[in-house]
Amino acid sequence: MYSEIINELNEQKVQLVAVSKTKPILAIQEIYSKGQRVFGENRAQEMAEKYKALPKDIQWHFIGHLQRNKIKYIAPFVELIHSIDEIKLLDEVQKQAAANDRIIQCLIQIKIGEESTKTGLNKDNYQDFFQHFENNNYPNIQLIGIMGMASFTSDKKQIRTEFKSLKMLFDQIQSQFFPKDDQFKEISMGMSGDYTIAIEEGSTMVRIGSLIFGARNYG
């Protein structure tokens, strides 16, 4: 299944983040051997352990809710954090990135799904966050786009509407805050069950786990 997915995404010029959370080293090595280099994890310490055990040309993306006290575990190597959703988190990423003499790329998570468990900036209230970033000094952080997760529903029309709203927000944010920044170009939206809709609505990056690795191991 991996080969079919990566061929489809390459045609669309969409980046694949292979979601390897809860998956063992051997499973990741198998997908790595097929050419995949970008993997996503949602637990900082687990990601740090996998970083130590696996080839160093892997680009590790942190894709889950990130606690401030866990940033120190991933700051030395993380390529991209998908889930920045508050100023305090941004401040801690800056602190840890500076301590490691690195620039860490980040996406800002916007809440587009209906579930109360979904996190992210309110899509009607995002401007304060970007205004803060614009007015303060974050030399070790590079914002390169936004991320959002659609509602967990079988209603494809609703999913499409939510993805469409995220693309509209991206266009507004890019125009208002990053008009001359070529690096602010990523829209991370779409997972195993809805990535085809996400691509149709403008996604540049999808996070796919179960279609590649099989059902998630909970624990």
Image (cartoon, helix red, strand yellow):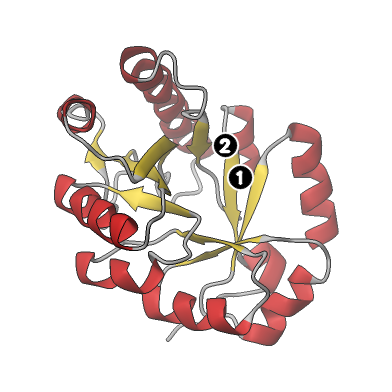
The residues tagged by marks 1 and 2 sit, at their Cα atoms, a distance apart of 5 Å
Measured as percent of width and height from the top left, residue 111 is found at 30, 41
Q: Does the image show residue 39?
A: yes
Q: Identify the residue at image location x=61%, y=75%.
A: 215
Relative image position of residue 173 (x, y in whole percent): 34, 21
Binning the other alpha carbons within 10 Å of mark 1 as few (below 14), some (14 to 19) or many (20 upward) gives: some
State left or right for residue 216 relative to residue 148. Answer: right
The kind of secondary structure element at disc 1 is helix
Q: Is residue 98 above or below residue 31?
A: above
Residue 194 showing in the rendered view: no
Residue 185 is situated, as x and y percent measured from the top left of the image, at: 51, 28
Residue 56, image x, y percentages: 64, 70
Q: Which residue type carries mark 1?
A: Tyr
Which residue is under mark 2? Answer: 198
Secondary structure type for disc 2: helix
Q: Are marks 1 and 2 in contact (CB under 8 Å)?
A: yes
Instruction: Kindly identify the residue that appears in the image at 41 percent across and 25 percent down.
Output: 170
- Note whether 68 is above or below 157 in the view shown: below
Compare residues 74 and 218 and report the one nearer the observer.
74
Q: In the rendered image, which quarter contains the N terminus?
A: bottom right
Which of 48 and 175 lies nearest the eye of the viewer? Answer: 48
Type of amino acid at the residue the image marks with label 2: Ala
- In this picture, residue 55 sits left or right of residue 183: right
Residue at the image position 43 percent from the left and 18 percent from the top: 171
Q: Which residue is mark 1?
A: 195
